[in-house]
Amino acid sequence: MDRQEEGPLRIAILAPLVEPVPPPLYGGTERVVSLLTEELVRRGHDVTLFASGDSQTAATLVPVCPSGLRLDPEVKDYAAYTLVALSEAYSGTRDFDLFHNHNDYLAFGMARLASTPTVTTTHGRLDLQEVRRI
């Protein structure tokens, strides 16, 4: 049976928290996440976007921090916020058919433990020696 005949997919999009989705100015990754998210919603899928609270989307928004982190002078470590957001997404309190991670390798540990498949789009540097190990 064709997947379309089964109904829409329940997709969790895991966005970086540096900028809102879509970004007001800078933010190539967040712009890609926005375009993908909005198109999936337009095609009838049930999409949940895990992103900063100042994001704008037609998907269901789960605000994992109040606003994009880059301009917040109180925030020094984006990874800590990201790991909390990923933990919330993978907590199992919601039922998804697919996770689409845009936080590079930070989700790999949780994705390996989840029964739901994860697709990761890497937006960062793949040429770095330490990243190649992952």
Image (cartoon, rainbow, N blue to C red):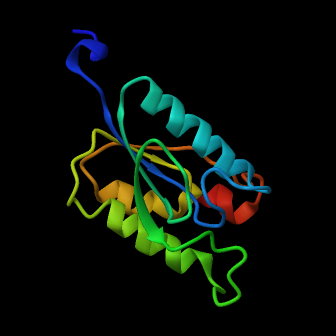
Residue under the image location 37 percent in, 55 percent down: 111
Residue at the outermost top position: 1
For the C terminus, give its image quadrant: bottom right
Q: Quadrant of residue 19?
A: bottom right
| Location of residue 133 in the rendering, given as x and y in whole percent from the top left corner | 62, 59
> Of residues 50 and 121, which is closer to you in this image?
50
| Location of residue 103 in the rendering, given as x and y in whole percent from the top left corner | 56, 58
111 lies above or below 71: above
Residue under the image location 52 percent in, 29 percent down: 39
> Of residues 49 and 91, which is closer to you in this image?
49
56 lies above or below 106: above
58 lies above or below 26: above
- Position of residue 41 in the picture relative to residue 94 (left or right): right
> Of residues 115 and 78, which is closer to you in this image?
78
| Location of residue 41 in the rendering, given as x and y in whole percent from the top left corner | 43, 32
Q: Quadrant of residue 116?
A: top left
> Of residues 102 and 37, which is closer to you in this image?
37
- Position of residue 97 in the picture relative to residue 132 (left or right): left
Residue under the image location 30 percent in, 15 percent down: 4
Figure label count: 0
| Location of residue 69 in the rendering, given as x and y in whole percent from the top left corner | 64, 74
For the N terminus, give its image quadrant: top left
Residue under the image location 62 percent in, 83 percent down: 77
